[in-house]
Image (cartoon, helix red, strand yellow):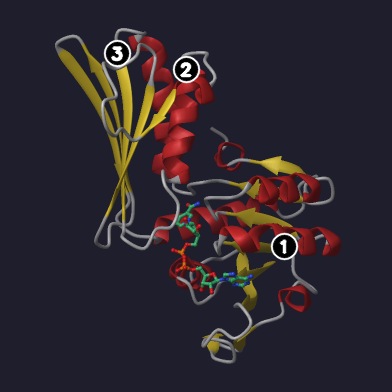
């Protein structure tokens, strides 16, 4: 059995991870953790497991932890896990350059799976988007539209950025040179080769991503709609089972799924 620690256990994704672990045959809940002072500390996370507030202590005896917390927490958590040689699965999005550096350093000592989206469908969409833009060529303008619930902090979504990166790979260009995140004011005609990303926020939408390929007199759309956060949690638990015992390094969901 693989023993997993869940920081952010009282969050929206934390609750889904606890549910996914209850149903999983290979990965069990070792410890659940929340921020110091959080109302959930001391309450039951699962049979026999109480939510604690000491992540470092929770790592003792664990094989892996699964981080769906907040960008400012991720770098701190991964550094602690590297010291204790506990593998990491990181789903938190909107990561700062400092958090990314912390992940990179930790990956010298532990295996880390980082993914902006843990669903099977989105990881398939990433491959389809790259293939489609390569096949359709420069006559087709590409745009990504993402829709998320009103509480989401980061924009565009980590998944939308990953789709834009896949489109840039399909065109052999550097995304930083061609991306356009939202438009406002007298922006003029659309430059050739631009990769646009638009973020919509509202309601309780779990997550929707559409890639538009807009060509002369025809248009192709590829859409993924997440119906439940449980799909991300199941994917993350699958990643946890996969990563425990792997050599140190940074891995993606493509590695986990063998795509
Ligand atoms: P949320 O705000 O509902 O939950 C986050 C939880 O983390 C909170 O309970 C908070 O108290 C806790 N937390 C913050 N800092 C902590 C720390 N230092 N130690 C322990 N706990 C801490 O947010 P959410 O909707 O569950 O999303 C969490 C993150 O996961 C976001 O970045 C979101 O974008 C991302 N996300 C990723 C995927 C994916 O597939 N990769 C899917 C959904 C959400």
Q: Nearer the viewer, mark 2 or mark 1?
A: 1
Residue closest to the far bottom: 42
Q: Which residue is tagged 1?
A: 76
Question: Residue visible at 45% across and 52% down?
Answer: 154
Q: Disc 2 or 1, which lies upstream in sequence?
A: 1
Q: Is mark 2 within 8 Å of ligand 1?
A: no
Evaluate if marks 2 and 3 touch, with contact meaning CB atoms under 8 Å apart. no
Do tag 1 and tag 3 residues touch (Cβ < 8 Å)?
no
> In the image, residue 38 lies at what x, y percent?
55, 84
Q: Secondary structure at mark 3?
A: loop
* Figure quadrant of residue 255: top right
Mark with earlier residue (1, 3):
1
Instruction: Residue under label 2, please give it.
Output: 170
Q: Can residue 46 be seen by looking at this rendering?
A: no
Q: In whole angstroms, how far apart are the C-alphas of marks 2 and 3?
A: 13 Å
Q: Is residue 127 visible?
A: yes
Circle count: 3
Residue 140 is marked as: 3
Residue 73 location (% of width, % of height)? 64, 64
Q: Where the N terminus falls, by quadrant?
A: bottom right
The span from disc 2 to disc 1 (Cα, nearest Å) is 35 Å
């Amino acid at each position: 059995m693989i023993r997993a620690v869940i920081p952010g256990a009282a969050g929206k994704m934390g609750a889904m991870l606890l549910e996914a672990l209850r149903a999983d045959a290979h990965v069990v809940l070792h410890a659940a953790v929340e921020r110091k002072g959080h109302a959930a500390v001391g309450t039951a996370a699962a049979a026999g497991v109480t939510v604690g507030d000491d992540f470092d202590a929770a790592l003792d005896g664990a094989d892996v932890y699964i981080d769906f917390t907040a960008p400012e927490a991720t770098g701190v958590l991964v550094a602690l896990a590297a010291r204790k040689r506990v593998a990491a699965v990181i789903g938190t999005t909107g990561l700062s350059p400092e958090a990314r550096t912390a992940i990179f350093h930790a990956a010298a000592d532990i295996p880390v799976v980082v993914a902006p989206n843990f669903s099977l469908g989105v990881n398939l969409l990433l491959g389809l988007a790259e293939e489609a833009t390569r096949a359709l060529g420069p006559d087709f303008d590409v745009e990504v539209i993402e829709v998320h619930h009103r509480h989401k902090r980061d924009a565009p979504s980590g998944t939308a950025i990953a789709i834009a990166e896949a489109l840039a790979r399909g065109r052999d260009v550097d995304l930083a040179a061609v991306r356009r995140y939202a438009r406002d004011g007298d922006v003029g005609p659309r430059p050739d080769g631009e990769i646009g990303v638009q973020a919509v926020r509202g309601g309780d939408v779990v997550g929707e991503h559409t890639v538009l390929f807009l060509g002369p007199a025809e248009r192709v759309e590829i859409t993924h709609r997440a119906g439940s956060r449980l799909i991300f949690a199941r994917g993350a638990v699958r990643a946890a089972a996969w990563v425990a015992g792997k050599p140190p390094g940074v891995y993606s969901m493509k590695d986990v799924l063998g795509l």
